[in-house]
Image (spheres, grey):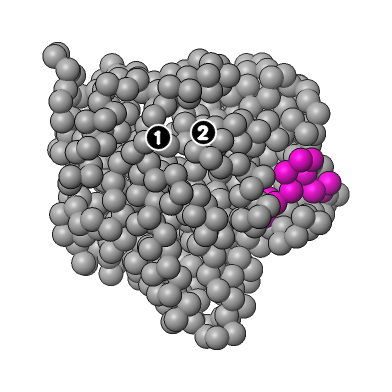
Amino acid sequence: MKRMNSLRQFFRIKPTWVAFNLVLTVATRCHASTDIAQFGGTVFLGGDWDWLPGIDGEGVKSRCEQGLDRLASHGVSRVQFAVTFFWDDIGPLNPPEGFDYSCKNADLGSYYCYNRFNATEVSHWCFHRPPFDQMPLDARSVGCAEVTNDEIDSFKYNVGSCIQKAVEMGFEDLEVNVRVDDGKSLEGWRNTLLFSPTQEYGQFSYETAILNTIADTLVESVQSSDDVQLAFTLQGEMGATIFFFADEWMDVMDRLSERIDSQRSEDAPPVKIGIHQNNAKLCGCFQVGFEGPHDEYIAMLDDMDTSLMDLESIRQLYARADYLGISAYIPMKSATFDLCDFEGLLERTDVELSYFNLSLKEITGPFDTRLHYSEFGVGGGSSNSGKTPAVTATQAARYPYYGIHGKHTCENDPFRMCECDAMGTCPTENPVREYRRYYFDQFSTYLSQGGCRYHNIEVVYVWGTGSWDVLGVYPPDRSWEDPVILEYKEHIQYAW
């Protein structure tokens, strides 16, 4: 705790800021720069309601298995399981006078509610939390119950059954991307959560409760096949922990590689271990509440003090990772753009990494670390509320990370897919729908040419929930699907 307290004291007076809300996953494999990256699909597991069978009716498959069926019907061969666990914390450490513990009116810059950096301590890890829309506001401060050994066994059995089905169905590459959400449902941002992966919070550490459980589930699920390539993303969109505990994360990498590879056949390919960062506000520790232009944020980085970070360990961590996952919701200034504009996000990331003595060119060059676009798509939203559809192509272009959450209706659908037939033919044009089609078409072309200045994209995973779910993966509501984008695979072979 001494280390945590020193960080907390050092950063207490620092301003805070927020990162883009990225939710789409696309996978691209290019073991050499001449290889062409391909799209993959995401099976989102937001809680046990997504991996337990019978949730959608007696005798109905789990949503995990339903998602695999959907991807297989589209001919997708790469799948990412985006698995969500939860943290519970002790609440705000030093709340300001008049602090609203319900966080009902909090904004992105508010103390604790969104920005947890130096504002709290992890209490324990959870495998279950009631769905957000089923948890009363006055109950959210209660949080979630600590994971039990029975819940770990249930996870291994049910998620393991789904992964085993993926193997039996012939999926070639299986990736698990692990992240944690706020167990109190107060919208805490995981990127700002400061914790050690090896310290016990309650009965378990992050490593023993979550990472070891995933590792054992993967091994047990793929025993029948030596051909399956496994990939394991350790901390989806969680930056503060790797920037302040990089040395511990390197040890965790080594132990997980040994844990998985030692239990597989010598003929099986070694597991790939990756780390995952946001596409902005990488350390989750500085100016978290800032929502202005990115250039203004970058100018503020001159005031960021990295003296409590071990920059050399951070460099080694990035070098040791087999891949770097990035949530790739790529904003554009207008609804038409050049192919190389897709690299604007990477260029901005490069600028921010330079403040930590890193660069993507170095990471993907001498380090030979690949890039995984862990989330990809266009949400068609115009604000972070998850309820306001974009009405112009320009809005959709500028804010691809905004989308619509919850059940699909014709009224909340920015793409108006309800007006279209089964082939995607629509009686009237919709600028947001047309932009999404243009965006995917252009990105497929960008991948086919192997990039512009950056070339090491290995896999691109299309996100699989809400209005980003262009593949219609997440059950029971698949109305966001666009058959026209699905048909790109017929004339752009490299895309799928």
Q: Residue at x 52, y 59 (%)?
A: 320
Query: Which residue is more in the foreground, 227 or 93?
Result: 93
Q: Residue at x 42, y 68 (%)?
A: 254
Magenta part of the protein: which range? 448-461
Q: Residue at x 34, y 66 (%)?
A: 213
The residue indicated by pointer 2 is 355
Left-right relation of 128 to 416: left
**Image location (x, y in percent) of residue 76:** 67, 58
Labels 1 and 2 touching (C-beta < 8 A): yes
Q: Residue at x 69, y 58 (%)?
A: 29
Identify the amino acid type marked 1. Thr
Residue 480 found in image quarter: top right
Residue 306: mark in rendering = 1
Q: Is residue 171 magenta?
A: no
Q: Is residue 450 magenta?
A: yes
Residue 432 visible? The answer is: no
**Residue farthest to the right, as pictured:** 491
**Image location (x, y in percent) of residue 452:** 79, 40
**Image location (x, y in percent) of residue 324:** 56, 51
Q: Residues within 10 Å of mark 2 (few under 14, many from 20)?
A: some
Identify the amino acid type marked 2. Tyr
**SS class of the residue under badge 1?**
loop
87 versus 301 height, above or below: below
Residue 113 visible? The answer is: yes
Q: Quadrant of the C terminus?
A: bottom right
Left-right relation of 275 to 107: right
Real-space Cα separation, disc 1 to disc 2, in angstroms: 9 Å
**SS class of the residue under badge 2?**
loop
Q: Earlier in the sequence, mark 1 or mark 2?
A: 1
Q: Residues within 10 Å of mark 1 (few under 14, many from 20)?
A: few
309 versus 60 height, above or below: above
